[in-house]
Image: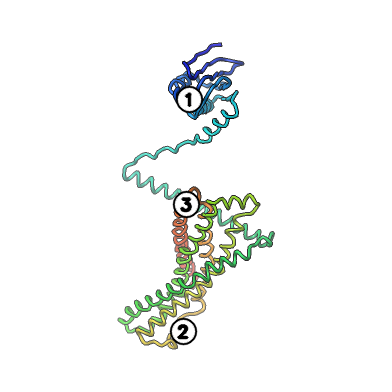
Amino acid sequence: MASSSVSAPGLLSLGERDGALRAQVSGRWVVASAVDLEQALGTLPNAQGRLLEIDLTGIEAIDTVGAWLLHRTAARWQAAGGEARIIGATQDHEVLLGQVAKADRPQPEAPRRLSLIPGLIANFGRSVSQGSADFVGLVSFLGETIAALFRLAFLHPGRFRLTSTVAQMQAVGVEAMPIVGLISFLIGVVIAYQGVDQLRMFGAEIFVVNLVAISILRELGILLTSIVIAGRSGSSFTAQIGSMKLNEEVDAMRTLGLDPIEVLVVPRVLALVVMLPCLTFFSDMMGLLGGMVMSWVTLDISPEVFVSRLSAAVTWKTFFVGVIKAPFFAVTIAVVGCMEGLLVEGSSEAVGRRTTESVVKAIFLVIVLDAVFSIFFATIGI
């Protein structure tokens, strides 16, 4: 047997046995000998598909540095195409080697510093790639939610959580009425005031009723309500589910055989689908009330005249064009909020980051959907 060795306290002897390369480790493999031991390990030949046996039978002591040197040697040998085994390890040695292997995580390569134009192009490419991945993830999560809804509706109706759904309806609907009503009333006042100021130049002040009614009923009522709910309830969904994820309550549900989509997501989606049209109707009424009050104050248009003019200016079609968008916006806000909550990982800082992303994404998607609806209604002549 050919052999080589290094001086104490750590020793490494190399030999051949049955075609395998045998590395006999003995002595003290500790940090004080790290330099010499690393040099000794550097004398190992190329792997070339051979088996390397690292025998720890004769080792007297080993610390984290020694375990790291042996683990790295075995990993490099395997990466070079060979096979590496560590034999003769006691239970304590195996625990230490296991901890070192668990901590061996590849570090991501540091991004290269680019000049201005290439840097802008690279950032744009990363943004497009991340946006595409987010869209695919959102569509996938929406599919999971729809599948869970069908399971609860047709296969396992007994698993539907009515109490949770009603509680969510109160939280996202009833408790949101004051803020939605106040904002809608003030927007009605602003539209009427600005409209009067412009229409007075043409002697057409009476048409302020048409302006307020059509603006509120077709666009602003549903849009303002959805933005308020995205900031209020969508962020709440993310924070609630994200906190449960950090406290491992979601993992506990899975361990108990419960589906988090059915338990956490479906009640929130259904509650918002039911309550957002109701909030939109309430927002429409408050917006019209604000416009009526402002018209009465500035133009002396009495409420009776305002209502009479309103009935002539708008039709039921105008009202339904706004309300029919509500369920679509509700699903978007709820799915985004719940998905971001389930994506929370790490610390409480991640909850805040995901909550912000949830609000931004929900508002962006609501505006995109509103634009799509506007084009669609214009195309079909409504």
SS assignment at label 1: loop
Q: Which badge, 2 or 3, comes first in the chain's sequence?
A: 2
The alpha-carbon separation of the residues under discs 2 and 1 comes to: 91 Å
> Callout 3 environment at 10 Å: few (<14), some (14 to 19), or many (20+)?
few
Which three-letter amino acid code belongs to the residue tagged 1?
A: Val
Disc 3 from disc 1: Cα separation: 38 Å
Find residue 305 and report its horizontal and vertical position in percent: 43, 88
- Answer with the quarter of the image where residue 304 lies: bottom left
Residue picked out by circle 3: 348
In the figure, 179 relative to 71: above or below? below
Point out which mark residue 212 bears.
Answer: none
Quarter of the image containing the N terminus?
top right
| Residue in the foreground of this view, choosing between 177 and 79 | 177
Residue at mark 2: 312
Instruction: Give the side of residue 136 with respect to residue 185, left or right.
Output: right
Q: What's under tag 3, amino acid-wise?
A: Ser
Residue position for label 1 = 30
The mark nearer the N terminus, 2 or 1, is: 1
